[in-house]
Amino acid sequence: LEEALENEEHRTALKWSAEELAAGLACLAVHDDNKLKIVSAGVLPVCSKMMSSSKWPEEQKTAADLIWQLAFNADVAEVLRADTQLMERLSALAEGGMKSASGAIWVMVKGKHIFLSYCWA
């Protein structure tokens, strides 16, 4: 994912886009055991970077989708809440009407939820 963001076209050497890679991680994050592994691998700064680029609005949404999926784990939600830069970016996107950013914030703030999670990708 980081490799894709470093490329001008936001693609890896194998032509995977940052958006496709983040969507794949969001699908993997549906399984609770993967959430902490994904965060431990260092995805949060990369998501924050994706959400800050107005040139790539679909990447912003996909990164927010991934954060939303990760936020359903209480331990991960705690890590997310502690990341002020990421929270500021999520808040800005939520204020702009992005549902996934609003959803991620809601899950982190409310903490308790009933939600069925599906990956349609």
Image: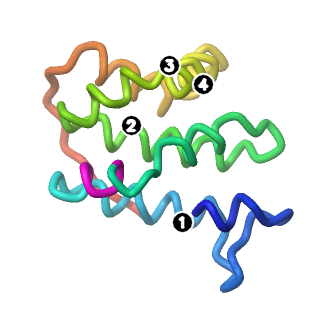
Residue 121 relative to residue 57: left or right: left
In the image, residue 110 lies at what x, y percent?
Answer: 24, 14
In the image, residue 22 lies at what x, y percent?
Answer: 52, 58
Residue 22 relative to residue 110: left or right: right
Name the residue: 66% across, 67% down: 3
In the image, residue 118 lies at what x, y percent?
Answer: 28, 54
> CB atoms at circles 1 and 4 under 8 Å apart?
no
Inspect the image, locate mark 1, and give the three-letter code of the amino acid beneath it: Leu
Tell which circle, 4 or 3, labels the residue nearer the N-terminal end: 3
Q: CA distance from mark 1 to mark 4?
A: 20 Å
Name the residue: 66% across, 85% down: 14
Q: Residues within 10 Å of mark 4 (few under 14, many from 20)?
A: many
Name the residue: 38% across, 37% down: 68
Residue 30 relative to residue 42: left or right: left
Tell me the residue that label 2 is attached to: 68
Tell me the residue that label 3 is attached to: 84
Tell me the residue that label 1 is attached to: 21
* Callout 1: SS: helix
Tell which circle, 2 or 1, labels the residue nearer the N-terminal end: 1
Q: CA distance from mark 4 to mark 3?
A: 9 Å
First to last magenta residue range: 35-39
The residue most toward the bottom is: 14
Residue 2, magenta (yes or no): no
Q: Is residue 63 above or below residue 24?
A: above
